[in-house]
Every structure is written in C-alpha cells, then in structure tokens.
Image (spheres, rainbow, N blue to C red):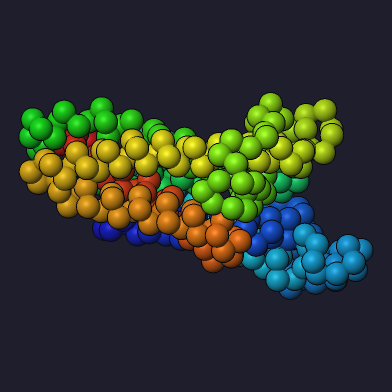
Amino acid sequence: MYRKLVWLTVIYTFFVVVVGAYVRLADAGLGCPDWPGCYGEITPHHARDDIAKAVEDQGGTHGPVSMAKAWKEMFHRYIAGGLGLLILGIAIAAWMRRDQPQRSPVLASSIVGVVLLQGALGMWTVTMLLKPVIVTLHLLGGMATLALLAWLALRQEHFPQPGEAAKRLRPWALVALVVTVAQIALGGWVSTNYAALACIDFPTCHGEWVPTMDFRHGFQLIRELGMTASGVHLSYDAITAIHWTHRVGALVTLAVVGGFAWALWRVPGYAAHGKVLTLALGAQIAIGIGNVVFSLPLWLAAAHNAGAAVLLLTLVVINCGLRPQRHSA
C-alpha cells in the first residue's frame, strides 16, 4: 500500500504541476488576489459579488480578475492542498514503518518540508503580485517536489545492479540532470517575464543570430514584474535577452542530454533508456520551437511545461537506475 501511495502521489503531482503551469499561462495567477481564499471566501461562487466589482473596476474580463480565472486559480489551490495531504500521509506511513530500510522516513519528511516551502511560495506569488523571482521559484519547487517523490517511489523498486560500462556514465547522468534543471529555471524565467514571444522568428531572433540585448536588467532577480530594480519599465532588449538565453540553453541541453542519450544506447541493458530520453528531449525541443512558430497557443505552452516535467522524470529514473541499489530512501 505504501508503494502504491507513493506512485499515486507522483502521478498526482505531475497533474498539479501541469495545472499550475496552465493557470499561470492563462494569466489567472491573480484571479483571486488574496490567499488562501478568494476575497476571503472558500470558493469564487461565494465571492461572486467581489469578483463582479473587480471586473467592473478593471473595465471588463480582459484584466487579471474574472470568474473563470478565479475558478482556475482556486482549483489549483484545492488540488495542491490535496497533494500536501497525500505527502503528509506518505511521511506518516514512512515513520510508522521506519524499521524497513526502503521506507526510511528521511526523504519522505524532507519532501514535507519542500511542500511547506512551496505553499509559502504560492502565497507570495499572489501577495507579491507575480514577482518574477517568486513565481520562478514556485515553478522550481513544483518540479523539485515531483523529482523527489519520483526518487522516493523508485527506491521502492528493485533494479539490476549496473555494470561497469553503466557505472562510468554516472557523472554524465548527473551533469545531464543539472543542465536540465538549469534549463527549466531559464524556461520559468522566460514564462514569468512574459518573454516567450520576445523573438517571433526562428531560428534567428529579430532576423539576427545575436540581436541587441540587455542582460543586466533582464536577469535582475529582485524586481517587480515588468520593471527594473530601479522602478523603470523593463526594455524590450531585456526581454529579448531572457528569451535568447533560453534558446542558447536549449542548445546546451541538446548537446549534453542528447550526447548522454546516445551514450546510453551503446550500453547493454540501457538502450531503452537512451531511446526514451531521446524521445523526451526531441519532443520538448519540437514543442519549444512550435511555441514560437505558432505564436504561443495556450495548449502548446502548457505542453512545454509538461514536457519539461517528463524530461526531468526520465533523467531521475535513469540516475536512480545507474546507482548501486541499497534500497534506502
């Protein structure tokens, strides 16, 4: 039952991460401008009068507040709350069965701490009005929760001991994972700064391989959305720098992760891992290009976030499979 609960929670977490990305991309992050309720109420239905007034004040439903956006935001909060309860249940179960090595409560308890921090980041995302660094950290927190839960689930499984050829790939596997996490962080920075269409052509940007860019303001972490740290509106050159850097990061990811996938193909017993990793990487790059070519349709933008989660999970599985199996969580 413990094993099934952990795997169920992994799947549920993936759903929560994708829904969270959809809410952000649908511009519904401030659908309810307070936290944890919606205008102090438990549902948008109970807050319909306040929402109607906010819609009137902003001049229509095109602004950050509407009944539809409020429901999207609150739905994400509801399912995130359910995830917190599931993870708490896993930690309690791990403590109750801590005599079994594969159910050591250390990792399960650590995930509870990550989820508590993630809840705080979710609150600050709203109360700090979508400050880019907070929203990006919230995205990374969701990915970290997913990766740690996947690692916990995988430690309940039995893998064959890796051979010498596979052992030599461990450092490369770790580097591929780190590069992917860095690229996800860059993607989050692109999304939270609304820079996904800063370059509307591909493969060039504004018709140039290296356009005019402002990296200093584009990568200032402590600032408000759309502003520099000094309170001036963020320039288009700064937004371009954010987008262009993510493209360069995609090339680095292609080289490192693609090279690692090719190496896996050549190791007996790990060819399937290499094929799956190649498929996940190729799909993610194709979706990223599609977002530019097709001007960021909502479903494709959400799929790009889902693809990042799939690529991350694939690398977590491979890293786990390449390690000596001690059956400890």
Q: In this view, does 160 lie to the left or right of 115?
A: left
Q: Which residue is drawn at 35% across and 53% down?
A: 282
Quadrant of the frame with the C terminus: top left
Which residue of the protein is positioned furthest toward the front in this rendering? 207
Q: Does the image show residue 189?
A: no
Residue 244, picture quadrant:
top right
Q: In this view, does 162 lie to the left or right of 17?
A: left
Q: Which residue is drawn at 45% across and 42% down?
A: 250
Q: How many numbered marks appear?
A: 0
Q: Does the image show residue 58?
A: yes
Residue 106: image location, x then y, percent: 34, 34
Residue 53: image location, x then y, percent: 89, 67
Residue 223: image location, x then y, percent: 74, 33
Q: In this view, does 69 lie to the left or right of 4?
A: right
Residue 221, picture quadrant:
top right
Q: Is residue 97 left or right of residue 219?
A: left
- Decide which of 198, 84 is in the foreground and name it: 198
Q: Residue at x 31, y 31 (%)?
A: 174
- Decide which of 291, 169 is in the foreground and name it: 291
- Decide which of 203, 128 is in the foreground and name it: 203
Quadrant of the frame with the N terminus: bottom left
Q: Residue at x 41, y 36 (%)?
A: 252
Residue 172: image location, x then y, percent: 26, 31
